[in-house]
Image (spheres, helix red, strand yellow):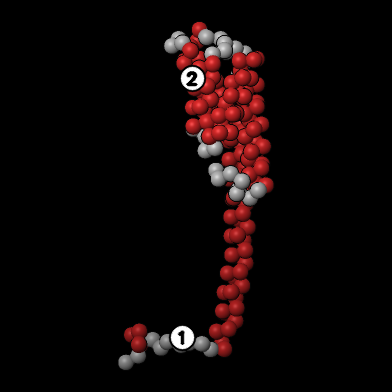
Amino acid sequence: MAPLGGVRSNVGVRRENGPGCLVQLLWFAVVGWWLGQLWIAVAWALIVIRIFGMTIVVPPLEEAFYRSLVYRYIIKYDFTKVALNHFDGVALVLVSLLFGAVHFQWLPGILCGLAYQWLVIRKGRLGDAMTAHAITNFLLGVYVVYKGGEAWKFF
């Protein structure tokens, strides 16, 4: 009795199988190249989305939270009665330490927190701090991409 219920199997290494193997290898090469290009495009799209988010979305949220809410709340429970340009050394240090603590690189985070809060106190508005924060994040993102992601481990 023949294997596979009476069906003869011609599987083996034969010269007639060469064109089929060649076509399959070419198929893998073309599809593999195409998928590789697709993954490169996806990777770049994710990088652009990440830089967009850290430049456009994050700075207004963080600045409104840290420079407006937390800073003034430390000064007075009814924080809406505290002007944005009010200086308080304890609140400045505490908010900057908190800002640095929630960032991967804590020391630059503390220094940036001090600089951004100084802008808010000096100008009495959040827009300058948001702009400075956005520029910082954008330049950081470009630098990380330029260095291949090794400059800062946040990708």
Q: Is residue 69 visible?
A: no
Distance Cα–Cα, label 2 vs label 1:
73 Å
Q: Position of residue 55 (x, y in %)?
A: 62, 33
Q: Closer to the camera: disc 2 or disc 1? A: 2
Among numbered discs 2 and 1, the one appearing first in the sequence: 1
Q: Position of residue 65 (x, y in %)?
A: 51, 22
Point 58% across, 24% down: residue:
114
Residue linked to disc 2: 70
What kind of element bears circle 1? Answer: loop
Q: What is the number of the mark on residue 11?
A: 1
Does the CB distance between marks 2 and 1 fall below 8 Å? no
Q: Is residue 146 left or right of residue 67?
A: right
Which residue: 58% across, 69% down?
28
What residue is shown at x 62% (from left), y 67% (from top)? 30
The part of the image, by quadrant, that contains residue 1 is bottom left
The furthest residue to the bottom:
1
The extreme top residue here reads 81
Kindly identify the residue that appears in the image at 63 percent across and 44 percent down. 144
- Give the camera-side residue of 84 and 9: 84
User: Residue 25: x and y, percent?
Assistant: 58, 74
Q: Amino acid at mark 2?
A: Val
Vertical comparison of 131 with 152: above or below: above
Q: Nearer the viewer, residue 127 or 153?
A: 153
Q: In the rendered image of this protein, does residue 88 appear above or below residue 111?
A: above
Quarter of the figure with residue 133: top right
